[in-house]
Image (cartoon, helix red, strand yellow):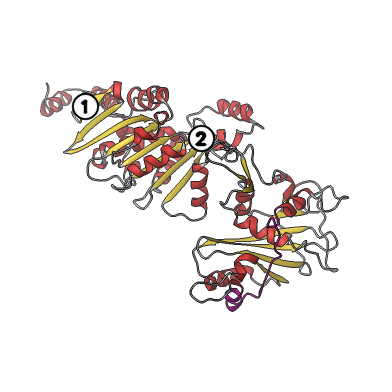
Amino acid sequence: MINLNEALDALAGLSTEDALIALNVLENDRKQKNFARYWSSDTSADYQFFFDRIEEDFSRFTKDIKIYSLLGGNRSSKTERGAFIAVAWLLGKEYFRDEPSWRYVKHLPIPDHGCNIWAVGLDYSIIKDVIWGEKLRRGHRHPGLLPDPQDPVITNIRDSEFQVTVNVNGRSSTLTCKSAESGREKMQSASVDLVWIDEECEEDVYDELYQRTVDCGGKILLTLTPLHDVGSGARRPWVYNLHKEFKQGRDDTVFIQLSALDNPFIPEEEKVKLKLKWAGHVEERARLYGDFVQRSGLVYPQWNREKHILKRENIPPAWRRIVSIDPAATGVTAVIWAAIQPLTNNVYIYRTYYERDKIVSDHAKEILMRNGGDKIDIWLLDPFWGVARNAETHKSGLQLWKEAGINVRLAPKADDFGRAIMAEYLSATLDAAARDPKLFVMGDLPDFVDEIEGYVWDYYGKGAMKGLSKDKPMKRSDHLMNATQYLLSMKPKGSNRGAIFTHAGTNSYT
């Protein structure tokens, strides 16, 4: 075998052109055997924005993050990224230092000690053909991400068991692929530093995998296209629930959405075909953008973005304004601001507040600050929370809010919390002569839209009635819905003065 000095002497005897060719051959050979070190390092300017986005996304996987989730459509690179992160955990940071792909690894909270990594696919065929076969061992458009089996860092590799053990400068780690189809029993006992779950498994399998990471402070990596119906009742939508918690401020979880249309390695003509294939399909946004799918179980199927969301306009000062508060001692306190149109009594929601884990006085300060100079005619409070006594002060919720500077009054107590009334406002059945809804959202209020589009009927999770509706909404992310229902239970009336908006078509005022 030629040593380094002999190789350098040989290169020195070549012309500059031949020496560059020889170095390029050597580099390409090294790249084939150690592709993880070169992952996403193409120097083409056309791809740099994509690689910069990967680096930015990976930088959000900090040591404080327990669950790092990549939601993406088909061919959005989510599984590719998951495979790279798993291999980086296996090989350790030092393996990548001063290499082209160091830009991605340097941000990741990879332990210095050896790690136990599990890569979990939905079934045996996905493990064999995709995760182990394509991403880790053989590759497709590029070599597999695992080093060549002859590389001295590989101490043991067993294709039949989808397992590899490496030793990098004394840091010994093992990566094992497992099938979620085998059930939670096959996921017990071990401590795991990183669990990579590719596509959405059953919740009991996820729960067991989570337990594997508890004693060692391990991490969970999710890469999936969210195709399971969040309202079907056939299975608990645990990924959707995690995403809701993230949106509400859970600080140990990150969700990043990837679009297939942003992947520069997909030809533009293929992107056009993708858009045409899924246009109008219920899975369109999941397949292309990684959004959640809602096919059934909606409490308010009357909701339609095109009908109910309007451009933001200045509301005439003479319109009656009502603020409705759904408070919480712990968790989310949600507030809506609504203006009532004169004569028609249409309701326009124009502002929201959505904050968690603050005391009443702090919530009140922020709500009043957000209110600005608006003249509020009525401040409404959850009628059940308002009469409950605080355990420490023995004061009612109503008293606490009044002492905090907001002169609230209790909303009407409706048997169904105003659920049916809200449906009438969305469909305009309150007025037999009206074709248009009587409830509108003005401008971009993402918290409200997220809630109403994920507001589904609860169902039995086990037993003979598994999957059947309980005839009540699921208790998750319903805070703005409750606040709206309290307000609409009043069937509020507009004043007899002030200008009237008329809107023709969708998303516009005239």
* 132 over 218 or under it: above or below: above
| Residue 201 position within the rendered picture, expressed as x and y whole percent measured from the top left | 45, 35
* 302 over 198 or under it: above or below: below
| Residue 484 position within the rendered picture, expressed as x and y whole percent measured from the top left | 68, 58
Q: Quadrant of the N terminus?
A: top left
State the SS at label 1: strand
| Residue 177 position within the rendered picture, expressed as x and y whole percent measured from the top left | 34, 30
Left or right: residue 364 versus residue 67 is right
Going by the numbered disc 2, the residue's amino acid type is Thr
Q: Quadrant of the C terminus?
A: bottom right
| Residue at numbered disc 1 | 156
| Residue at numbered disc 2 | 225
Q: Which residues are magenta?
A: 399-419
Q: Quadrant of residue 360?
A: bottom right
Left or right: residue 326 versus residue 319 is left
Going by the numbered disc 1, the residue's amino acid type is Asn
